[in-house]
Every structure is written in structure tokens, then in C-alpha cells.
Amino acid sequence: MERALSLTACHCCLSRRQFLRGCAGCGAASLAAGLPATGWATEAVTASQPKVRVRLVFACWALVQDRPTWPHIGHDMRPEIERITNALRNGCPDVEFLPTVAHSPADAEKILAQHEADKIDGYLVYNMNNWIQVFHSIAASGHPMLLADYIYAGSGGFLVYGSQLRRKYKNFSLIGSSNTEDLIAAARCFSILKTQGVDAFVAACDRVRQERTPPPRLTKVAEDNLELASVGNCLESIKKAKIITVGGGSETLARSIGERLGIEVVQVTFEEMAEAADKVDRDAADATAARWKSEAQKVIIDNPDETLRLSAINYLAQKALLEKYQAEAITINCLGGFYSGKLKAYPCLGYVELLNSGMVGACEADLNSTVTMVVMNHLVRRPGYISDPVIDSSKRQIVYAHCVATTKPFGPQGPANPYEILTHSEDRRGASVRSFLPVGYMTSTLEIFADRKQILFHRAVAAENVVIDRACRTKLACEVPGDFEKLFLGWSGGWHRVTFYGDLAEPVRDLAQALGFELVEEA
């Protein structure tokens, strides 16, 4: 495993040569390739005007990503490290940045151990992978910190952990923006540390983030004629619903879902799904694969015919299980199953088929999201889009990202939108979907937690489909008309959310009241 850059060799700003030499022997020496010397020269600090010294920590699993997670396996972090270091040094002349890389919590502890010796005034942590947990101990140390997100790379950990820690520790601020100028503006606030202290620094960073977040711009939304069932009929009908979970799903949560919503959860093994796949009609699978290939705008996957055939077999096995158990929803531990070889294909394309037909296919054996999709399907007869959200303050957007999404967001009888078939982003294998969802419409995003009797809810206007080769394939960016800061800093309940087309504020309030669940309006 790669180690953090050596921190014991010098106690002053690292020159380019020192920065690279610190990587020697840890697999990071190749960072030297393509780095211009001008960006790494140490700037002199005069005695009359000492600069604030900031340890610039790039938190990533490896300089060239060695595992399937965001942004994706094989992603080279070094150009981004170079770009951000140069941008900060050029944009913050009153701050001396000392760059290093940390690959683990242990590396973070080593960095903190050098705090006094290196005469560090503060920390800027650039989070480049989701769950690396480098910034946790720095936040807990009490030292001033600015936590920044490498958008579509470290966004999950940044959002989930960052908001959790911010409620606990008051010594740091956060910036999640696709505009580097926002990061530079926040980083300039380090210059007040020596004279005004930590509280003033954090307040100044928060002000920068708030002032640079634009006001709502999408004041008009497209007309959308919703057809809603009554809440009473919805709650009565879901008592007949059944969910299959394959290879995962908490039994305790399943009991809560049954007791509080009346929805039965059936646990199924990977072996049973494999048996169903073995019985699939191969001609039917070939026909399904051919249809997908002809309908997609483009297909960019390895061995497309065989990969699509395996995906179609997986889909037909899902249908067989749904028929066997008389269920309307299926959720599969897709990552665990595929990585272990227990699934021969990702279920993404099958989920799209189910969602478009009025049934439910949900990722990652996530029962909370699956329940949300089932309940709302009975209420509004529209499919949900499960996602990993990303915050982009530069556009006042929350971006819903996943490698699968419906292509009929208005329901089975509604129009279909274009889509592409690409590899699953994180590991560059299999087949998944990039759906170009319609823009201009109000969307409602929620998560129902039966175990804690709670519903999380916010609204946003669909603004654009983001196409960038980091993170999951479908990325629906939506502008938040409500309290953006509340949504960002108050994030709770894990990462996943489920998005539906339509303004569902009132029916969701009625639903929460009828269930006796707490409604948390996130924005």
C-alpha cells in the first residue's frame, strides 16, 4: 500500500523536489511525470511578513486508483493534485501551502504529529475518495481546517462524514464546488488565522461559501400533471406488496418494514438467483439484448454482445424470482455479488426494464430506498431514481448520481428519454446506463426509514445532465429552490436518496402524518 509523503525530512514548505522525494519507495515516485518545476518552487517568507502555513493534504487511496470506487479504478490523481496546488499557490499569495498525500487515518495521525515541528497554522484537506476518513482526526484535533471536495470523487465521504463532523466540531468549514475559484476564495481566509483566530476563520469560510452560492435561477418549471392515489389507498395497497432482497438486507430492518408498513421482505440467496438464471430462455435473452443495443444512443462496453446477453439473462432471472414470490420489487447486493463472482452480470439494465414497466428494481440491497420506491410507486405511479448525491455550491445544485436510472420518469405510459449503455463506472466492467433525464421539471427526493419512523424530503428543479468521466454514469443535476445551506450541512441518514419527478411536498406530508412518521424537510 502507498504511504503518505514523508513528513520528517523537512519542517518548512516542500519544494517540488522534496515533495517528490517524499514519495520515493512508496509507489508515488511517478508523480514527477509531467509536473512543471515552476508550480512547485518554494516561495521565500520574509521575517516582517510571515505567511500562514497550511498543510495541504490530498486524501486518496492511491495516486493511481487501485480499487473500484469513486471516481473510478485507474484514475490518476496526480494531475489534479498538481492543478489544485498551483491554483492555491497562485491564488493565495498570503498563504504558504505545504502539500502532502495521505492514504489512511494512520497517515493523518502522522501528519498531526508533525504539527508543532512544522509550525503549521491550519489544514486544507482535499478529499479525493469517498470513505478514506483522513480528515476525521484533523477535525477532532481542534486545529483549523478547510475540507474541500474533489467533485465526483470524494463527494460521498465529504457530504456524509463532513456534515456529521461539522455538527460535532466547530473548527472547520467545507467547500464543495466545481468552480476552483470558490476553493481559492475560501482558502484565502487562512490569512486571518494569526490575527483573528479559529472561530473567525471558520465564519469567514462559511461566508465565502454562502456568498458564492448563487440564488435560485430556475423560477419557472415545466407543467407536470400528477395523478395521485389517496394516501389511505396507498397505505392499504402496500400491505399486499412484497420485496425480494438478494444476497443482503438487514433482517432487523426487514421486520420493521413489515411491522410499520405491512410490506413483506423475502430474503433470497445468490445461489437461488443463479438457479433462476440457469433456467432462462436463451433466445429470449438474446432478443432482449438485441433490443437494448438497438435502442441505446451508443454502446461502449467490452464484448458488447456477450455482456448484454449476460445482463439480459440477469434481468430475466429477476423477473422469474418476482413471479415465483409474487413480489413487485427486487433489490440485489450487486457490488458484492459481482465482485465475488456470484453474479455474472450487473443487474442495472434489468432494473431499468422493471422501473419502466411499473415495478421496482433497486441497487445494493438497500431496503430503505427500495421501500421508498415501493411506497411512492403506489402513491404516484412513477418510478424512483436511487442515487448517490453530490453537492455543487457553485451552481446551487444537488447532483443525483448512479449507474442506473429509469428512462421513463413519468411512468410506464409516459415518454421515454434517450440513454447510453456504458460500463459500470467504478470498475469499468459490465453494463450500466446513462439516462438523459428531462430537465425543467420539479423533482422530489426522499428516503423513508421504517426503523426510525422518519421521512427525509427535499425538492429541486432538474437543470442538466452532467457528463463527466468520474463517478456514476447518470448524473441529474437539480437546482435547489429552498435552503441550500440546510440541505448541505444538515445531511443525515446515509448517502442514498430516491428522486421522483413531480412536486410531492403535500402528498409526502400527508403520508408522514398518516404513518405517524417524522417528516424532516431537508431544504
Image (cartoon, helix red, strand yellow):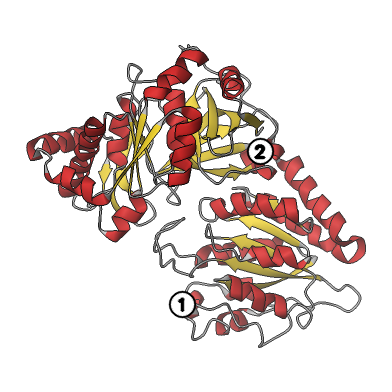
Q: Which mark is residue 487?
A: 2
| Residue with the mark numbered 1 | 1
Q: Nearer the viewer, residue 333 or 3?
A: 333
Which residue is found at the position 66% from the left and 88% from the top?
A: 9
Rendered position, 499 above or below 83: above
Q: Are marks 1 and 2 in contact (CB under 8 Å)?
A: no
Rendered position, 356 above or below 75: above
Q: Which residue type does callout 1 highlight?
A: Met
Question: Which residue ends up furthest to the left in the rendered image?
Answer: 283
Residue 385 place in picture, x, y as percent: 43, 33
Q: Is residue 146 visible?
A: yes
Q: Nearer the viewer, residue 43 or 289?
A: 289
Which residue is found at the position 56% from the left and 80% from the top?
A: 20
Residue 38 place in picture, x, y as percent: 62, 73
In the image, taking residue 106 as reference, residue 69 lies left or right, namely left
Q: Nearer the viewer, residue 149 or 379?
A: 379
In the image, taking residue 331 as reference, residue 458 lies left or right, namely right
Which residue is found at the position 72% from the left and 42% from the top?
A: 212
Q: Is residue 475 visible?
A: no
Q: Which mark is residue 146?
A: none
Residue 186 place in picture, x, y as percent: 74, 54
Give SS at disc 2: helix
Q: Earlier in the sequence, mark 1 or mark 2?
A: 1
The quadrant of the rendering that contains the C terminus is: top right
Q: Nearer the viewer, residue 278 or 69?
A: 278
Residue 468 place in picture, x, y as percent: 45, 47
Q: Quadrant of residue 240?
A: top left
